[in-house]
Amino acid sequence: MKIPPMDYPHKSAPADVPILEALRERWSPYAFSDRPVENDKIRTLFEAARWAPSSFNEQPWRYVYATKTDGEARERLESLLMPGNAWAKSAFLLAVSFAKKTFTFNGKENRHGLHDTGAASAYLAAQCPALGLVAHQMAGFKVDEAVSLLGVPADFVPGSMIAVGYPGNPKDLDPKSQERENAPRERKPQKEFVFRGNMK
Ligand SMILES: Cc1cc2nc3c(=O)[nH]c(=O)nc-3n(C[C@H](O)[C@H](O)[C@H](O)COP(=O)(O)O)c2cc1C
């Protein structure tokens, strides 16, 4: 799928070797436009998440989301943000992921619930560039309140909060966020996390 032109520069990953376009163009910005995200695009994002792999095909992920048009539901999601992530309030869509802690088929603990939910959220984020959208995941939210406020059953644990929207203008950000927005993208070299045979 071709990446559509954006009214905001991409922050492509300076990958050492070529990688899939969607992975190269995905990044986590701070500036979001308040332009509404179309319903069919929202459906496409969650469809991408739906096709993530999972242990025993449990599909342990759940998402609670609200857009800027969702009134009280949206306020509830915004109230979960830690102050350091206040920039996310400008994103049109806010979501929280949850992972089911047990397997449905036998009731036993699913050690990979959060792992697989992370994969689903990564799929969602990787779908964004092709839709002209950006996503930014966050650990900085009130996890206990997320469970009580969003009607989450006991068998689920919070994953991440996710801001999604059209890219915004970095000039509208506070100075600290602007600095982070413009910082170069960095990664450890492969030799620090890839080991052939053993980790010694
Ligand atoms: C699970 C998770 C939690 C994160 N939490 C936060 C957060 O609370 N606040 C924030 O500004 N960024 C957060 N990030 C974004 C990371 O800082 C970002 O992914 C990382 O710096 C790499 O940048 P890139 O996504 O643009 O490649 C989080 C990302 C993930 C996957």
Image (spheres, rainbow, N blue to C red):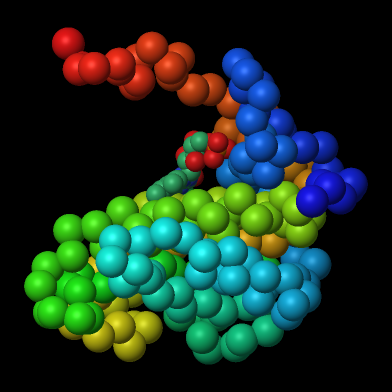
Left or right: residue 198 versus residue 69 is left
Q: Is residue 28 above or below residue 33?
A: above
Residue, x 67% and y 70% (percent of image)? 44
Residue 65 in the image: x percent, y percent?
52, 77
Residue 8 in the image: x percent, y percent?
83, 43
Q: Is residue 81 above or below residue 188?
A: below
Residue, x 28% and y 66% (percent of image)? 56
Image quadrant occupied by the C terminus? top left
Left or right: residue 151 versus residue 198 is right
From this viewpoint, is residue 88 visible? no
Write down the quadrant of residue 32 in the picture: bottom right
Q: Is residue 72 above or below residue 130?
A: below
Of 77 and 86, which appears nearest the observer?
Answer: 77
Residue, x 33% and y 88% (percent of image)? 151
Residue 136 in the image: x percent, y percent?
55, 51
Residue 100 in the image: x percent, y percent?
26, 73
Left or right: residue 189 versus residue 174 is left
Q: Is residue 176 above or below residue 76?
A: above
